[in-house]
Image: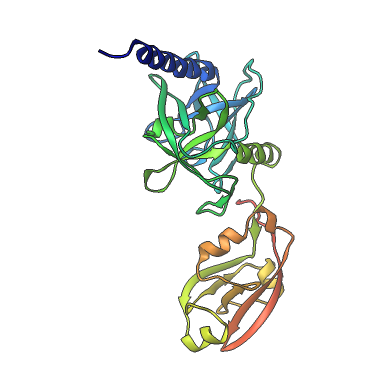
């Protein structure tokens, strides 16, 4: 026969997770920002909703379904693709500011509840932390304070929801990563990025004013530059009055080094052009018509798209 104490413990745990979901429910909204389907968002401050940037296909007049089932229109305040965070403005709601908790106590093996809201009601997924690592750069160059992977199934409609630990502490936002992996954008990243979106509408990123494309180079040239791989980035365009143009970089130059580090891919450069790069002077090692040279470039903030 089953142990009554074990059954009671399981029932208590089950009720506890349901209570956690009910407790966070007033902050969860449905975002109708996809052309096909919905995603989740949450009320961060009165009148402000955070959601997953990747799931937000529309920029204007985004319908949002509130916890009471009524629908309102939201406007975009700002979005940062590099950290997958978007901020929307809605009609002000009488809720207290959301309190985030540090994610540094989270370890592999801890249980996490992913809370979301779908058109039919609340959604929940429970799983364990599969990986809890340190800071990392996203594929789009964003600085994410912790690498947190969850071992659970998260559908598209629940993306942009909230990750809670078993104590009900808010650890961050759940998103879908590469190959369907479930990631948490940690609270520290949200607390850093969301105020920037509120103030500026975007997160500052570095800008060289160069169009780059990978290219294989002569092995002798690679050896002369001390590169382990015969790869570089050819300059296919130079923006007028951009930092690269002012530094003397020309179309056809081959970029091989950023300060002392090789740059074999465009993604490497993109990662280096994070918010902290703005205003910095970097030495770019290039090859021009077989001649090696170094040019100093001052990184500027990327202009807003028109």
Residue farthest to the left? 1
The quarter of the image holding the N terminus is top left
Please state which of residues 242 and 269 is positioned toward the viewer in this rendering: 269
Using the image, determine if residue 258 lies above or below residue 6. below
Res 163 visible = yes
Determine the residue positioned at 41% across, 48% down: 178
Please state which of residues 277 and 145 is positioned toward the viewer in this rendering: 145
Q: Is residue 232 left or right of residue 199?
A: left
Q: Is residue 183 left or right of residue 239?
A: left
Please state which of residues 80 and 193 is positioned toward the viewer in this rendering: 193
Total tally of numbered discs in the picture: 0
Location of residue 20 in the rendering, given as x and y in whole percent from the top left corner: 50, 19
Location of residue 162 in the rendering, given as x and y in whole percent from the top left corner: 51, 29
The chosen color scheme is rainbow
Res 38 visible = no
Determine the residue positioned at 47% across, 30% down: 112
Location of residue 67 in the rendering, given as x and y in whole percent from the top left corner: 50, 17
Q: Is residue 213 left or right of residue 258?
A: left
Using the image, determine if residue 46 lies above or below residue 50. above
Location of residue 121 in the rendering, given as x and y in whole percent from the top left corner: 41, 18
């Amino acid at each position: 026969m089953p142990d009554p104490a074990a059954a009671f413990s399981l029932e208590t745990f089950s009720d506890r997770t349901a209570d956690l979901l009910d407790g966070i429910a007033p902050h969860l909204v449905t975002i109708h920002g996809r052309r096909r389907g919905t995603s989740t968002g949450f009320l961060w401050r009165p009148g402000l909703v955070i959601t997953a940037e990747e799931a937000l296909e529309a920029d204007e007049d985004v319908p949002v379904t509130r916890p009471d089932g009524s629908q309102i229109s939201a406007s975009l305040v700002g979005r940062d693709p590099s950290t997958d965070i978007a901020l929307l403005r809605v009609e002000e709601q009488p809720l207290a500011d959301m309190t985030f908790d540090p994610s540094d106590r989270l370890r592999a093996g801890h249980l996490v509840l992913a809370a979301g809201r779908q058109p039919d009601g609340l959604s929940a997924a429970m799983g364990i932390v599969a990986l809890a690592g340190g800071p990392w750069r996203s594929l789009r160059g964003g600085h994410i304070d912790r690498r947190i992977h969850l071992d659970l199934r998260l559908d598209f409609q629940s993306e942009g929801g909230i990750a809670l630990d078993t104590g009900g502490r808010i650890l961050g936002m759940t998103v879908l990563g590469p190959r369907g992996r479930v990631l948490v954008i940690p609270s520290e990243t949200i607390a850093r990025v969301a105020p920037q979106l509120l103030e500026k509408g975007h997160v500052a990123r570095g800008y060289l004013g160069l169009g780059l494309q990978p290219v294989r180079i002569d092995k002798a040239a690679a050896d002369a530059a001390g590169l382990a791989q015969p790869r570089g980035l050819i300059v296919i365009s130079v923006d007028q009055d951009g930092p690269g143009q002012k530094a003397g970089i020309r179309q056809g130059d081959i970029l091989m080094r950023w300060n002392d580090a090789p740059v074999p891919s465009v993604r490497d450069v993109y990662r280096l052009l994070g918010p902290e790069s703005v205003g910095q002077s970097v030495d770019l090692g290039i090859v021009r018509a077989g001649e090696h040279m170094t040019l100093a470039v001052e990184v500027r903030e990327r202009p807003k798209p028109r």
